[in-house]
Image: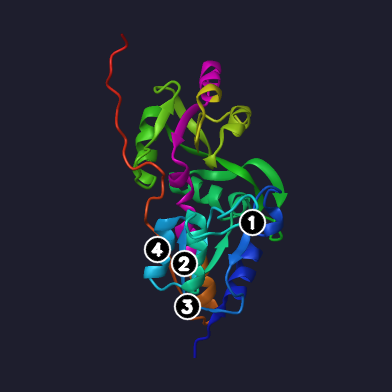
Amino acid sequence: MSKLWTVSDVIAMMERWYPSRTAHTWDRVGLVLGNPQQPVKRILLAVDPVKATVNEAISGAYDMLLTHHPLYLRGTSFLPENDPKGRMVASLIRANIALYTAHTNADIAHKGVADALGERLGLRDMRPLISEGYDTEKHEIGTGRIGCVETTTVTAFADHVARVLPAGTHGLFIGGDIDAPVRTVAVSGGAGDQFLDAARQAKADVYLTADLRHHPASEHCEKGTPALFCASHWATEWPWLPVLANRIQAEAAAENVSLSVEVSTMCTEPWIRHQPTLGGLQ
């Protein structure tokens, strides 16, 4: 006969894989709200704890919403329901849905966000772009990943990346020599312009990340390689969710636990439309 996990059991599993102690000091990860002793039959995974995913969790009668991004990164003293986040907190509590987040601790981990993005692109022989040591199972962990692909060109690899990343309004921006050869690729899910120098020092031919700012990207391209691929924050982090879903379901099956884990396919980029600008320069 199958058994049930509680919220606390799910947290313990996540702590084994993505220890909260490995999160950046500024980060806020873990159980945001909910009863640790509450039984969990259904979990919804999403990148963002926003109105759309909260409503999805409520309408789907999930017991737990597990997101990559935190609800709050700074302290708050008020939770009025005329505030969007206050309203989400109240709605989740009324629906008896626990909210848990794994952010920078999931970014650096084995089978975490960086690994999932690299695997999505087909990188081989991956290692951390910036090593941060080893986990308890002796897997090297750290920021970003770097690996190799069959020799191609920037243009052809951009076509491949555009095909395999989840669809969104932002799309993919490319900077650099589009005809240059590509063999070594660095990736970092989410905002990653602070790792431009690391990608260059690692001799990457392409660096894929998100949220690249004008000046750092421009100055980088003036210096040469690697070529830059700028995707959306959401699109570079969503590939971890199916990986996590499979891990949780496999663990539940191994322990004879009755559990349904589903991935939200709702695009939560802030942009709803991409409109090319066509005005003249006079």
Query: Residue drawn at (39%, 35%), measured in percent from left and top?
Result: 172
What residue is shown at x 65% (from left), y 64% (from top)?
A: 15
Q: Which residue is mark 1?
A: 77
Label 2 close to label 4 by CB (< 8 Å): yes
The residue at the point 34 percent across, 46 percent down is 167
In the rendered view, would you say 270 is above or below 75? Answer: above
Q: Is residue 267 left or right of residue 67?
A: left
Q: CA distance from mark 2 to mark 1?
A: 18 Å
The percent coordinates of residue 103 (x first, y second) are 59, 53
| Residue 277 placement (x, y as % from top left) | 30, 24
Sequence-wise, the earlier of marks 2 and 4 is 4
Q: Is the residue marked by circle 2 packed among few (<14), some (14-19), or many (20+) residues within 10 Å? A: some
For the residues bearing labels 4 and 1, Cβ distance under 8 angstroms: no
Mark 4 or mark 3, earlier in chain: 3
Distance of label 3 from label 1 (alpha carbons): 32 Å
Q: Which mark is in front, 3 or 2?
A: 2
| Crowd band around label 3 with a 10 angstrom C-alpha radius: few (<14), some (14–19), many (20+) | some
User: Which residue ends up furthest to the top in the rendered image?
Assistant: 282
Lower position in the chain sequence, tag 3 or tag 2: 3
**CA–CA distance in space, label 4 to label 3:** 18 Å
Q: In terms of image quadrants, where is residue 77?
A: bottom right
Closest to the observer, 228 or 60: 60
Q: Residues within 10 Å of mark 1 (few under 14, many from 20)?
A: few
Foreground label between 4 and 3: 4
Quarter placement of the C terminus: top left
Q: Which residue is mark 3?
A: 41
Q: Secondary structure at mark 3?
A: loop
The residue that mark 2 highlights is 91
* Secondary structure at numbered mark 2: helix
Residue span colored magenta = 217-245
| Residue type at the position of mark 3 | Lys
Give 106 or 100, whichever is nearer the viewer. Answer: 100
